Image (cartoon, rainbow, N blue to C red):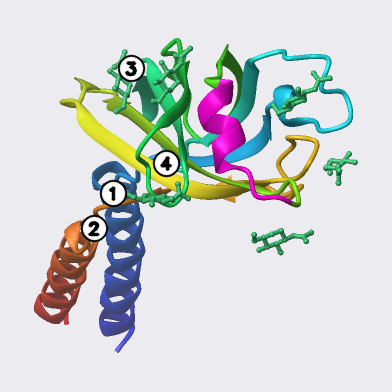
Amino acid sequence: MPAARRKEGCGCCSCIGLGISALFLWLWIHTSNPKCSIQTLSLPSLSRPSNLTTDPTLSLTLRLVNPNQLKGIRYDPLNVTVYDFPNKSDVIGNILMPGFYQGYRKKASKLGQGTANTTVAFRAVSENGTGYFRVDMATAVKFKTIYGYSKRHRIRVGADVVVNASGVKVDPKGIRLRSMTPKMGNSCVVLGALVNFLVFTSLDFW
Ligand SMILES: *[C@@H]1O[C@H](CO)[C@@H](O)[C@H](O)[C@H]1NC(C)=O
Ligand SMILES: *[C@@H]1O[C@H](CO)[C@@H](O)[C@H](O)[C@H]1NC(C)=O
Ligand SMILES: *[C@@H]1O[C@H](CO)[C@@H](O)[C@H](O)[C@H]1NC(C)=O
Ligand SMILES: *[C@@H]1O[C@H](CO)[C@@H](O)[C@H](O)[C@H]1NC(C)=O
Ligand SMILES: *[C@@H]1O[C@H](CO)[C@@H](O)[C@H](O)[C@H]1NC(C)=O
Ligand SMILES: *[C@@H]1O[C@H](CO)[C@@H](O)[C@H](O)[C@H]1NC(C)=O
């Protein structure tokens, strides 16, 4: 009887060990793309009362979050394009931000500036001064693990942004940029395989 109990206790230890290894394995395999959002966007030339300033500066703040455990992200240059909405027929402005490295679970806010095509911008604004813009961001990332860098993953995300008569983004909260071609199942398959693996090894165990 005592021998049996000792054996059981030992099995439990191994089970916890297996669980911890599985957790690390999952953290190691599981990779999420960075989360991107637009914090600010301003186009002072759209400001109605001060029409004197035809400052064509287009500025926006991009927030980038690396949600991964144990994986850094190396960003290629970030290419942000602001289009009129919903046609996306004309480009209002383009901002190219330099690439950078982001450690795991780190957040970054990047301010970028470009020159707006005020002709297109004015055309996209309605009579009451509200403007609807489409903001797209394209880049590529490599994930860094202890084994080095992964291959490049292309990222194309976008969102609709509303600016008021001052040419300032209305929503004070960040607007999440989302993938235009949702690619799903990838991490689910890995998770499923892992669950199967765990179930079968524990069945084996008992
Ligand atoms: C203000 O902007 C409108 C539209 O672009 C233009 O027609 C008008 O001449 C401008 N007024 C001044 C004072 O610059
Ligand atoms: C940025 O994206 C726009 C729109 O997709 C494209 O026209 C432009 O060539 C890109 N610029 C760079 C430097 O990749
Ligand atoms: C969208 O494009 C169509 C023609 O292609 C045009 O008639 C319409 O005015 C455009 N809308 C906006 C908001 O630019
Ligand atoms: C602004 O965009 C219009 C339409 O796409 C284009 O004809 C014009 O040349 C552009 N202006 C500048 C300064 O790039
Ligand atoms: C301005 O006009 C747009 C449509 O043209 C409308 O959706 C929006 O609610 C209006 N905003 C205000 C503050 O009146
Ligand atoms: C536009 O929004 C900004 C920031 O929320 C605000 O400071 C500004 O007064 C607004 N302008 C108009 C005309 O509503």
Relative to 81, say whether 12 is above or below: below
Residue for point 30% across, 44% down: 31
Q: Say which amino acid is labelled 4.
A: Asn
Q: CA distance from mark 4 to mark 2?
A: 13 Å
Return the residue at label 4.
Answer: 68
Q: CA distance from mark 4 to mark 1?
A: 8 Å
The range drawn in magenta is 118-127
Quadrant (top left/top right/bottom left/bottom right) for the N terminus? bottom left
> Dividing the picture into quarters, in which one does residue 94 lie?
top left
Q: Say which amino acid is labelled 1.
A: His
What label sits on residue 187 in the rendered view?
A: 2
Q: Residue 92 placed where, x, y %?
A: 49, 27
Return the residue at label 1.
Answer: 30
Label 2 or label 3, whichever comes before in sequence order: 3
Residue for point 37% across, 20% down: 75
Label 4 or label 3, whichever comes before in sequence order: 4
Residue at disc 2, CB closer than 8 Å to ligand 2: no
Return the residue at label 3.
Answer: 76
Find out whether residue 119 is within the magenta segment: yes
